[in-house]
Amino acid sequence: MILYFSGTGNSAYTAQKIAENIQDDTLDLFQKIRDSDHTQLCSDKPWVIVSPTYAWRIPRILQDWLTKTKLAGNKDIYFILTCGGNIGNAGAYIKKLCTSKNLNFKGCVPVLMPENYIALFRAPQEEESLEIIRRAEDTMDQISHFITNNEMLPQPSLTSKDRLNSGIVNNIFYPAFVHARKFYTTNACISCGKCEKVCPLKNVHLEKGKPVWGSRCTHCMACICRCPVEAIEYGQHTKGLSHYVFPKSIKNK
């Protein structure tokens, strides 16, 4: 079974593409994370976790959900991390998690997808995004081959910088940067409430028709990127930038 968490669609597409290749089912973890639902899951086939990369690790909300949820049946588990750059030393921390859950870690690999972390970076324009996704599909096919044959995923080589980014930098980055204090709405807001609905932590609610953010943000970028009128900004950085969601032109193929 393929479990995935996705803020703006990159990991969702990756999960669905691999599911087609290996003839397996997918489960979107959004509602389970949102509802703190830790009901046991069972799969006869190897587990495959598809996730975005947050500060060179899996998102802490996903780590927490996996820690608290029993995955029964097959003991093998693969991790596929979508990213805009690299995943650092994420695999080492995932392996520790798997060991604690008595699961057989079969590797962790990156899939380079369009950048969506517009709180700090620039998202590519659609033409560039389509080219990145086209190349990523080749990587997805290669990963699928390893999973189908029940083989270990080839592990990327590591540098001291990778270890630093996934360790000390990750631990500093979360408390320093991962918060909702800079989110705000412009006059373009139409009070549709989508930002409230797409938040995996129930951290957004409407007051007088306008979104208000709480203190449990994970920086998934769902609220800002999925706003249908791009009425949400993050400080001064996102002004004038494209708000990335996975391209509809590929979804509708």
Image (cartoon, rainbow, N blue to C red):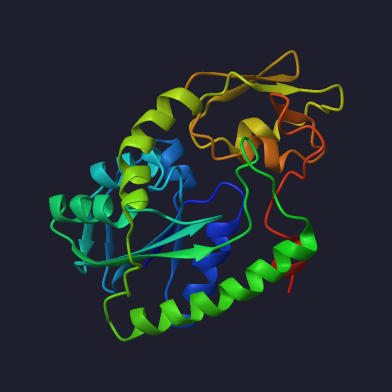
Asked whether, in this view, residue 186 is left or right of residue 165, the answer is: right
Seen at 31% across and 49% down, the residue is: 163
- Considering every residue shown, the one lying at the far right of the view is 188
Tell me where residue 47 sits by quadrant. bottom left
Asked whether, in this view, residue 14 is left or right of residue 133, the answer is: left
In the image shown, does 167 or 108 lie closer to the viewer? 167
Q: Quadrant of the N terminus?
A: bottom left
Q: Position of residue 140 (x, y in %)?
A: 50, 75
State whether residue 23 appears in this view.
Answer: no
Seen at 19% across and 51% down, the residue is: 96
- Vertical relation: 59 (above or below) 23: above
Please give the count of numbered marks on the rendered protein. 0
Seen at 34% across and 45% down, the residue is: 166
- Vertical relation: 53 (above or below) 42: above
Q: Quadrant of the C terminus?
A: bottom right
Q: Position of residue 169 (x, y in %)?
A: 38, 36
Q: Position of residue 122 (x, y in %)?
A: 69, 45
